[in-house]
Amino acid sequence: MSVGEVSHVSNVIFDLNPMILSSAILIVSYIILFTEKLNRAVVALIGASVMIFAGILTQETAIKGIDFNTLALLIGMMTIVGISEKSGMFQFVAIWAAKKVKANPRGLLIVLSLVTALFSALLDNVTTVLLIVPVTFQITRKLQITPYPYLISEIFASNIGGTATLIGDPPNILIGSALNLSFMDFVNELTPVVMAVMLVQIFLFDFIWGKRIVTSEKHKKLVMKINEIDSISDWCLLRKSLFVLIAVIAGFMMAEHFHIANGTIAMFGAAILLLLYTLDEDHNERDHKVEEALGLVDWTTIFFFAGLFAIVYGLEEAGVLTVLGHKFVEMTDGSIEKAAMLVIWVSAFVSTAIDNIPFVATMIPMIKSMEESMGGREAMMPVWWALSLGACFGGNGSLIAASANVIVAGMASREGHPISFLRFLIWSIPAMLISTGMAAIYLHMRHFM
């Protein structure tokens, strides 16, 4: 296929080949991102700007390429979770769960994994580990036991649990927004395999560590003396936050019936919680609280996504992704099953090596370009679910594969319990292979038998 058949670009600098130039910009951007020498938002914005300066995009087409539904969903949920966290509700649940198993180290390993997986599905996995890991250190210090197995288990649980829903992991947010999928689409399709993988992880960790982690009754009593109620710092905010969180999740579940985008629901929920949060304050205090709450949004991630969308759209405009899509169809002989199996394993291994967000952002338009020649959107859905499962489970493949992993490693290092890259691989590669293998079997049984 010639460039002229697929490219929408006509004013490229120095009359260079738009496909080669756009590919070079993407590759250089990804290499710099992989080295982590520069801030990822800066790299993405510079890459997007170079696409415009090179003539591959205009400012208008770059903006057209940005998925504002994804950005709205991220900003809304970050605001809601950031305000809700101030009430102490999440720490309350973690401590309450620890006490329910009588501070038994073996039971603690199970319950903290389950809490992490649940919160990761309903909030997001990065926020979850930021909330759960400090409580983990608090409890393990009192029990005088190593936090290492708990931290590893929580990393895996955060990535596995986040796979279950639209809002749990950024790759799902990207896929859901691109295909206009609902919250319940993800729950119905992915929750069964996520639950199965979590059960296997819990069994394996209990088998390996369960009997090796012991503590004394004296230390258990120290944990049992912790009053989880003390974690609640603002009861009024707790009630407001719970109301909005439940309403927003219910809104996600019903959104498809009212044809309302998930980003709109998240932003509306954030606005309502900001209103309730500042309702009784005077003018100055109200403005201060709103600014403080909006400061809880991870704007680095937001601008990273915006730049990344523009870079990938440059490849789409240049026709690169269409060509790759046709090559992929030829490679799989037009078979949906072959395509799904290839996508899930490639996604898992690539996501092990690099951040899964830019990989998924690049794969989405490529897979879209394949749909017409492979039977349309409905026929291609197993391939889309394969992309989600492979990218999310691949996030467990290495210490740099997902943001949650990096955050836990940083917190562990500050607490004097560093997690080395190679030591983590001993756990992460088997975990990635087992979870991806289970997901591949699940997809085969669900869609191809």
Image (cartoon, rainbow, N blue to C red):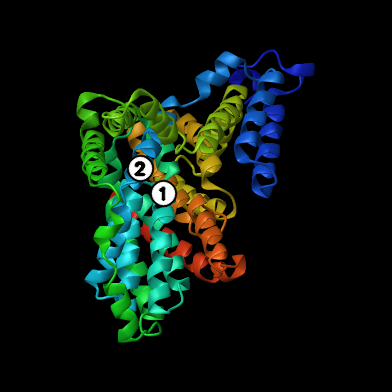
Please tell me which residue is depicted at 30% across the width and 27% down the height of the picture. 268
Residue 449 seen in this snapshot: no
| Mark 2 or mark 1, earlier in chain | 2
Name which residue type carries label 1.
Answer: Thr
Q: Which residue is mark 1?
A: 127
Please tell me which residue is depicted at 24% across the width and 30% down the height of the picture. 255
Q: Position of residue 289 (x, y in %)?
A: 39, 33
- Circle 2 crowding by C-alpha within 10 Å: few under 14, some 14–19, many from 20: many
The correct choice, above or below, for 391 with respect to 243 in the image is: below
The correct choice, above or below, for 364 with respect to 233 in the image is: above
**Tag 2's secondary structure?**
helix
- Circle 1 crowding by C-alpha within 10 Å: few under 14, some 14–19, many from 20: some
Q: Which residue is mark 2?
A: 81
Please tell me which residue is depicted at 35% across the width and 64% down the height of the picture. 113
Q: CA distance from mark 2 to mark 1?
A: 8 Å
Dots 2 and 1: beta carbons under 8 Å? yes
Label annotation for residue 170: none
